[in-house]
Amino acid sequence: MQPTAQNQINSSSFRDPTTAWLGPDNKWRVVIGSKVDQLGLAILYKSKDFVNWYQSKTPLHSANTGMWECPDFYPVPIHGQNGVDTSLNGPYVKHVLKVSLDNTRHDCYTIGSYDNVKDVYKPDEGSVEGDSGLRYDYGKYYASKTFFDDFKNRRILTGWINESSSVADDIKKGWSGVHAIPRKIWLARSGKQLVQWPVTEIEKLRTNHISLANKLLKGGSVIEISGVTAAQADVEVSFEIKDFEKAEVLEPSWTNPQLLCSRKGASVKGSLGPFGLLVLASEGLKERTAVFFRIFKGHNKYMVLMCGDQSRSSLNQDNDMTTYGAFLDVDIRHHKLSLRSLIDHSIVESFGGGGKVCITSRVYPTLAINKAARLYAFNYGSQSIKISKLNAWSMKTAKIN
C-alpha cells in the first residue's frame, strides 16, 4: 500500500517530534519534520492540554534542502556555557534549529531568533542552510537530539553513529549502529557557531595517565604514545605552530573541506601539516586512522583544515573509508591548536579547537585490534611542530548499574 497524503504531505514524510516548549500564551508547541517535494518543513503544532493538537497556519521554518528528519529546536544563552530550559526566550538567548537531512544523512543547524508570538524562526544573517552551512559533526553522526539537564544546568547532545561495514559484516558481528558519547553543547563566544565537548562523566573512566610536554615533532617524524591501551583511550594534545609564512597557499577553488582532505590526506606531505594523531594503528602502519590539521595561507588570514582520514583504516576493502573534513575557526597566531580524540575500538570521536569542529569515524581495522592497536603523534609536513602538551589515558569499560 502507498502511504496516504494529506495537505500535499506523504505520511512517510511526517515524523520525529521535537521536545515540546511552552509559549507566552501558555500553549504547548512541538515541531514535526516533513517535506513537500524538496522543501524541508518544520511543521508547528500547538496544544492547550498536551493531548489535543492543532496545526499552525505556517511552519516554524522551511528551506529547499529535502526531507527534514529529527528536527531539534532549543535556546542557547548568548554568554557562558550553561544550558537553559527549552521554553526560555528573550534578549539573552539565541535559538538553534537543527535538522537531519535525509538526502545526505548530515545533521545541519542554523543559529537565529525565534518570534514566539508569530511562531516564526529566522536564521541570523550569514547562517547558511543545508550542507554548505554548519554541522554538528562532519563524520558519521546522525539523527541527534538534545535535552536540558536541569540538575547541572547544561544542554546535552546525543547522536547516532551508523555503520561503515557491509550488511554481511553487520550480520556477522551481530550489531549495527551505536550512540556517540553524550556531549555538552553551547554557543561559541562569536555567536556564530556551537561548541561541543564530551560530558565530564566520561572522565571517570580514565586510568593509566601518561603525559608529554614540549616535544618537538620534526618534519616527517612519528612518535609512539605508549603506556595506554590504544584501542580504548582518551587523548588530549595541543600543538604550537610557528613559521606561519611558510604555510601553503589556499587556492580560491579549494572551498570544499571534505574534498580538500581527500586530495590532501595524511600521506600527502605539505608545509605546516599534516600533523596530528594516528589512532587504531597497526605496527608498521599498514592500518591507521589519521586525525590531523593542515595550515593554509588564505585571504588576509590563516586557515586551519581538520581532517579525519579513514582511507587506510582497514585492510577490509568492503568498509566505507571516506575521508572527512572541515575548516576550523580559530586564530592560531594567538592560540595553540588543540585536539581531543576518544577512541573505542571501532569509533574515533575527535574534537578540534576545543570542540568547534567534531569528526566521528567508524572504522573496522583487521590488524589494529585490541592489544595490537597502536597510538602515534605524527608530523608529515616539512616544518617542525611542537607538542606543547599531551595527556592520554586508557579508558575503563563502562559498567551499567
Image: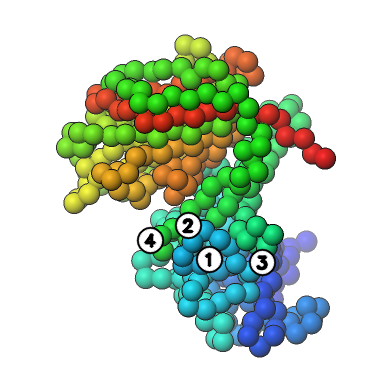
Residue at 34%, 48% in the rendered image: 330
Q: Secondary structure at mark 3?
A: loop
Residue type beneath disc 2: Leu
Task: Indicate the position of residue 368 as horizontal and vertical percent values.
Answer: 57, 18
Q: Are marks 2 and 1 in contact (CB under 8 Å)?
A: yes
User: In x, y percent, where is residue 241?
Assistant: 28, 34
For disc 2, the marked residue is 194
Tell me the kind of residue under disc 4: Ser
Q: Nearer the viewer, residue 4 or 330?
A: 330
In front here: 19 or 313?
Answer: 19
Instruction: Give the class, few, some or many, for how many residues have Cα within 10 Å of label 1's Cα (few <14, many ≥20).
Output: many
Which x, y percent locates residue 62? 52, 72
The residue tagged 3 is 18
* Quarter of image, res 242: top left
Instruction: Name the quadrant of the C terminus.
Output: top right
Residue linked to disc 1: 76
Q: Residue at x 61, y 45 (%)?
A: 200
Separation (CA) of disc 1 from disc 3:
16 Å
